[in-house]
Amino acid sequence: MRDYLLTLCVTAAVTYLLTGPVRKFAIATGAMPEIRARDVHREPTPRLGGIAMFFGLCAGLLVAAHLQNLGSVFELSNEPRALLSGAALIWLIGVLDDKFELDALIKLGAQMISAGVMVAQGLTILWLPIPGVGTVALTPGQGTLLTVALVVLTINAVNFVDGLDGLAAGMVCIAAAAFFLYAYRLWYGYTIEAAAPATLFAAILMGMCLGFLPHNMHPARIFMGDSGSMLIGLILAASAISITGQVDPDVLKLFEGSTRQATHAALPVFIPLVLPLTIIAIPMADLVLAIVRRTWKGQSPFAADRGHLHHRLLEIGHSHSRAVLIMYFWSALIAFGTLAYSVHSTSMWIVLGVVALSAIGLVLLLLPRFAPRAPRWAESVVPPRYRRRKRISVPEPLAEAPAVEEERVPVPAGINGATAIGNRARFPDRRKAGTPS
């Protein structure tokens, strides 16, 4: 565990320290595209944050290769080299897209090629565990198609959710943390060396996200761009492929006894198949809804719009920061709830806890719709929108008129308290009072 923590800290430190110089480089090279219709930020912000994240990945792999306990991962497996090859290709395409705005079909082809590069070097799904049946070996063609599909879906799911400051990096960090705990349990608890690469990938991914988040939290000073979102999506998919398709379920000796007993005992093996989907359940749902919505309107599935889940949170009245925290909450609930269920599948308390937290999350999600008013003793510690109506003062000639109460109408809050869905000036007016226009 110490070696994994050291690798995580080095990755986070390198990513954090390089993000500042990368920001200056992005500004100097003009990698600051104009504000688009679907954007929620108010001023042009540099991209290319994926450059710092990629060098953080390289630093993490370099440090891990020289550690005594993790060096065997590079000697016994070719997966780290396969990951670095695919990551370098998708990162290069992302850098070009951040600067020159590549076509969506070109990026889709690059994603498939990156997945193919990893498959060619051995990072692929070889078999699938099926309850009551055991291990089902896949043909090379089936394994390649399944691997490429998982990589492309994960990359685009992460890319679609990258719409608010700190949203994609935080959600992927939560996903990587849950996956790290599960992979480490298989590696340390079951002494399965084949789970070590996935554990290393998850630790490095956490470090990349944690190092970039301080620069990307609202208000963001730099965006990761497609060079960062596609990169972390590929690493997340590679972790899932490594532990799902490379770890032989028969090593766990779970498929013994009756079919019912084997099905129940094999639950921890099937969780890797479900966990990559649950930890990105929200981005994946956003991806599916976006495709259905755009196709229904006769648009291209790759056409940009403002109908994503984070846009809808802003529309119902959540502020930028609160919308991000709500997405964090649901991602953590789904990821760690699934992880807890895989460890203690017979505990009813886990199910009850997930249900209770889901109810709390639903209340927080719909809170702006109800616009509740706090009691008078708590008005000093709650936001103004939840305070009771206040009387407004009237001039002396109208003193005999009845008091007029001001209705507090909820206003959708967005960036810095302003609406995030209406028309706004690209640059704020910063002229001093009294200066000529």
Image: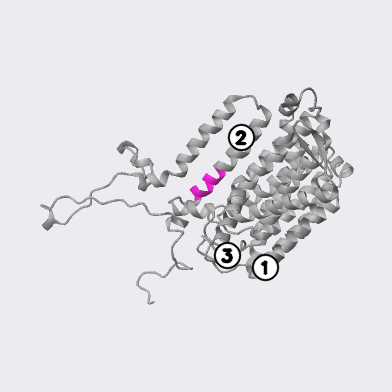
Q: Amino acid at mark 1?
A: Asp
State the separation of the CA atoms marked 3 and 1. 16 Å
Q: How many other residues sit within 10 Å of disc 1, few (<14), some (14-19) or many (≥20)? A: few
Q: Position of residue 46 (x, y in %)?
A: 61, 64
Q: How many other residues sit within 10 Å of disc 2, few (<14), some (14-19) or many (≥20)? A: some
Residue position for label 3: 299
Q: Is 207 within the magenta?
A: no
Residue position for label 1: 103
Would residue 85 appear left or right of 170 to someone viewing this image? right
Q: Where 295 sits versus 309, above or below? A: below
Residue position for label 2: 337
Q: Dot 1: what SS?
A: loop
Residue at screen point 69% across, 65% down: 105
Total number of numbered labels?
A: 3
Q: Position of residue 397 (x, y in %)?
A: 11, 58
Q: Dot 2: what SS?
A: helix
- Quarter of the figure that contains the N terminus: top right
321 and 262: which one is in front? 262
Residue at screen point 56% across, 44% down: 328
397 and 344: which one is in front? 344
Q: Which residues are magenta?
A: 321-328
Q: Amino acid at mark 2?
A: Gly
State the separation of the CA atoms marked 1 and 2. 38 Å
For marks 2 and 3 on the same chain, the one whose residue lies earlier in the sequence: 3
